[in-house]
Amino acid sequence: MLAVLLAAAVFFGAAWGYLRLLQIPAGGGAVAALPAGGGSLLHDTHVLLAFAALAGTALLAGICVAAPRISPLASGLPGLGLLAWSVLYLVRVRRAVAYIPLKHDTFGVGFEAMLFNGVLAAAGFVLVVPLFVPSRWRRRVPWGGEQLDAVAAVPASTLISSDWAETAPIPQPLQPLQPLPPLPSAPTQTMPQQPPDDAWT
């Protein structure tokens, strides 16, 4: 689902924004016309929307590439598609252009412009990077889960050897507790009586 969402964002969002921001420099040493006459673009709504479309697509692609919990196929499949389209453009330009959907719409024209300028090839190389990172293909488990998964994967018959099973003592049923014998009473000691005072007289 993320791969389909990213591919749609590249075709609709990035292509539309790139076409609206595309400025072709003048040739022959002439100075190209600068957007907004070289002033600020913060008050140009069309430029801001185009920047937002490109930034949103780049943010989604960056999350799919960098987030370790996301499958590498989320960015790898659209990246492989963009690279395949770029290779086809190098081999057969007419056929690569013929496969672009909505060629007469803004999205198709913007996608064609990104294909001609090498933007799709650059984006494809970035998107396929997670496919070659081995850690992205491993299932992440919580702390201590590796030991639990390892024990669960071992059959119960192999956990207890036959030799130990033959020599192990058979557990006996528990016997009821017997009352403890009473403690011997301590002998009573009598204090010696002092003789009366008149006995010394």
Image: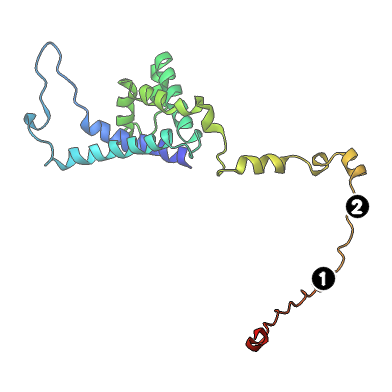
Q: Nearer the viewer, residue 15 or 5?
A: 5
Q: In x, y percent, where is residue 12?
A: 34, 38
Could you tell whether 136 is left or right of 181 in the image? left
Question: Which is closer to the viewer, label 2 or label 1?
Answer: 1
The quarter of the picture where the C terminus appears is: bottom right
Question: What's the amino acid at mark 1?
Answer: Leu
Picture residue at 18% right of the left edge, 37% below the top? 47
Q: Which mark is residue 180?
A: 1
Question: What's the amino acid at mark 2?
Answer: Ile
Q: Nearer the viewer, residue 59 or 117?
A: 59
Looking at the image, which residue sits at the far front? 201
Question: Are there few (<14), some (14-19), or many (20+) residues within 10 Å of tag 2?
Answer: few
Q: Nearer the viewer, residue 120 or 56?
A: 56
Picture residue at 84% right of the left edge, 72% below the top? 181
Q: Quadrant of residue 120?
A: top left
Q: Quadrant of residue 15?
A: top left
State the scheme by which the image is colored. Answer: rainbow
Question: Are there few (<14), some (14-19), or many (20+) residues within 10 Å of tag 1?
Answer: few
What secondary structure is marked by label 1?
loop
Picture residue at 9% right of the left edge, 33% below the top? 36
Q: Which mark is residue 198?
A: none
Q: How much space separates mark 2 and mark 1, taking CA atoms?
A: 28 Å
Q: Which mark is residue 170?
A: 2
Looking at the image, which residue sits at the far top? 28
Q: Quadrant of residue 149?
A: top right
Q: In x, y percent, where is residue 146?
A: 62, 40
The answer to whether the residue labelled 2 contacts the one labelled 1, judged by CB atoms less than 8 Å apart, is no
